[in-house]
Image (tube, rainbow, N blue to C red):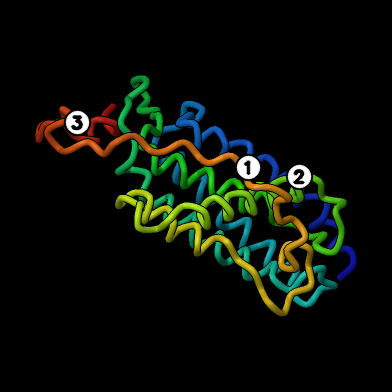
Amino acid sequence: MSNQLSHLQLDFKATRDAFVAELEKFSEGDTSGRAIVRVQAFLFHIKNKLAMWATIRWNLRKEGRCFEDRCINLMVMADELAQDVPYCVTTDINERGAVDIQDLVMQKRFDMFAMQLGSLTLWGHSNIDTTAVENACMAEEEQRRWEQKPAWRDDERSESLRLLWTRLYYKDILCDCHQCLDSYLPARDPTPSPPLPPMLTYSDSGYSDSDSLSGLFEE
């Protein structure tokens, strides 16, 4: 058991941080030259790794009982993102079908995912995992922003993001880790997020029925 945990600890932080670095690029629209299927494969790889982390840690000495539930939450999110990626990319970069992610809602979803994955930690009873602490603080600031923004002002995009964040922002009232004990609440109100631009209508977008994402898969 102790050997398993040691191996998990050695692998966990480096792998998590590498995932987060790529997801942060996705949140800016940059897929690092990936085609749609490779973006999906990357997300499924994250999902599988989360399942492995949760399984290996089961019945081992734990620092926070919320870890497995957080992994499950993030696994669902990874799967949803993978399913939605084909509908949210708009730019063919090269002949290999590499894409940018230009949909602003999709970019924000990746930002939320990166933040929550980055706050996942095996060291829930301490601040030794500084990257997780930084992401947990950002998550609390994000939560405060949603709390301060009246829901009645949401358009359909903001409403969907609010619902998504509500699912991702997980606290276990029986857990004694620092995140669930609200140790990272912001001391002052964070800077508000910039508003999304006005929604375009179908005619405003210049998109015609002849346009199709199928071209991204053509050789």
Residue appearing at x 11%, y 31% in the figure: 208
- What is the three-letter code of the residue carrying label 3? Ser
Q: Are marks 1 and 2 in contact (CB under 8 Å)?
A: yes
Amino acid identity at mark 1: Val
| Left or right: 109, with 54 as reference point | left
Of the 4 image quadrants, the one containing the N terminus is bottom right
Residue 131 is marked as: 2
Residue 205 is marked as: 3
Q: What is the quadrant of residue 175 in the picture?
A: bottom right
- Residue at 81%, 71% (x, y): give it: 62
Q: Nearer the viewer, mark 3 or mark 1?
A: 3
Residue 189 point in image, percent of width and height: 63, 47
Q: Residues within 10 Å of mark 1 (few under 14, many from 20)?
A: many
Instruction: Tell which of 182 and 31 is nearer to you.
Output: 182
Please identify, in this view, whether the residue under mark 1 or under mark 2 is nearer the observer. 2
Residue 76 seen in render:
yes
Judging by the rendered image, the residue that carries numbered circle 1 is 20
Whole-percent x and y of residue 193? Answer: 51, 40
Precedes in sequence: disc 1 or disc 2: 1
Q: Tag 2: residue type?
A: Thr
At x 38%, y 50%, the residue is 158
Give whichever of discs 2 and 3 has the lower sequence position: 2
